[in-house]
Image (tube, helix red, strand yellow):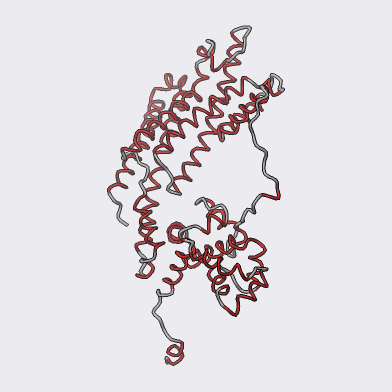
Amino acid sequence: MAIDSKLSKNINFALVWICLPLVALVGVVVFFVYGGASWVGPFLPQTISCIVAAILAIGPLVACVVQTISRDRQADKLDNVISPAIKNTRYFLLAKANLDSIKPASVSDGDFRAPILLFATIISFCSLLSFMGLFWPGYLQRPSFILIGMYHASNIEDLEQYQAGTLIAASIAFIGAYLALFHRLLGQLNNNDIYPISFHYYSAWLLTAMIIAAIYRHIMTIFGLGPNVEAFVVLISFAIGGLPAPFFSALLHLAFNKLSITGDKDDPAQAALPTNLNLLMIDGLANEKIDRLGELGISDAQVLSCQNPFMLWARLPYDLSLIVDWIGQAQLYVCVREEGLRIARTLGIGDIQKFAAVLGDEKASSDLCDAMHFKPNFVAPLLASLADSPDYVCLKEVKAAMLTVLPPQSAAGAVAAP
């Protein structure tokens, strides 16, 4: 497939951002080898820290190129569908419209340029602060309200050691936050769920994680911990970086409890909780396929039952008929739940289309109601609700269109052929 102009711009921007730190790295190596060892030696850690900061900053920029490539490949796969009947279904038209509306994240896009560059700048700043802050001990000998908090140091050495510990906690939080954000960024790019505001959210996540880690470092005594808690500080800081919101909430709850202020509601009773609609109930879905669906945000059968099969087929290596069958099973599962699905399978009913066909048959309906403990008065309203469900109607239309892919041939003609 030919690369369009927008994709070319994305690749060019990515190559520029990749080449700049690589050229700097090559220049440092050449200078070090050809007579610059006496100068580079004392500053080699700082030089490496700058290169690492540049690589961390361009990582999200390079990852954004993948979204454009993925969207073009999905559109190309849909364009190669040869059946006119399938192309006229509502699900197919929705899938094409959805792909056409996707606006990939790119530095060349004016809406994304400022948020992405701000995010990269904050990554560079936090990275340099984390990796190079300890190379200037003179800075740590001057008290900083963020690094020292309310701690009263008896001498310069004590002050420097305490502020270095706070800086280490914030640095560990930055590493945890960067790993979590990069994983989340890849997931959102994979699901076409990235917007300019997302990068501002990532920037706030990084800064918030480092500040919360520093605050937790100052209030360790509240949790009844002694002064020598280095290992715990590292562990809690990494966890704060990966997910700062729960720790911020825990900090607020701790403060509210100290002030005897409560406003939380009790959790619902276990008997009142709905079932989790596990995807393992769907025939043909093994753990590796469930993991692949999980990458697309499909966590249970309820979510799967509402999916557009063409959107899944464009992004998965599975056959279209198999994906349609999974969605039909999920719709039946959501309708009758675990016990009803087990009974339906014993009767040879594996998806929602078969279930509706048997339930709408005058002769078979009563037997199905007896087997599944339905009241006959529920049959007509249940069928009416299915007819009003967009997911059921659109999937039925797709299954009907799939039957026209092969030319019709009568059974008698097939037998009479030589």
Decide which of 186, 155 is in the foreground and name it.
186
Total count of labels: 0
Q: Viewer-proximal residue, 324 or 220?
A: 324
On screen, residue 209 above or below 352: above
Single out the residue that lies furthest toward the top: 155
Q: Please determine whether, in this image, residue 60 is positioned above or below residue 372.
A: above
Among all residues in the image, which is located at the extreme left? Answer: 5
Determine whether, in the image, residue 1 is placed left or right of residue 209. Answer: left
Q: Where does the image place residue 304, in percent across and percent down from the top left?
A: 53, 57
Could you say which quadrant of the image residue 255 lies in? top right
The residue shown at (64%, 54%) is 275
Q: x%, y% of residue 254?
A: 65, 26
Residue in front for this viewpoint, 142 or 313: 313
Q: Is residue 226 left or right of residue 353?
A: right
Rendering coords of residue 124 (x, y %): 43, 28
104 relative position to 296: left or right: left
In the rendered image, residue 324, in percent from the top left (x then y), is placed at 49, 65
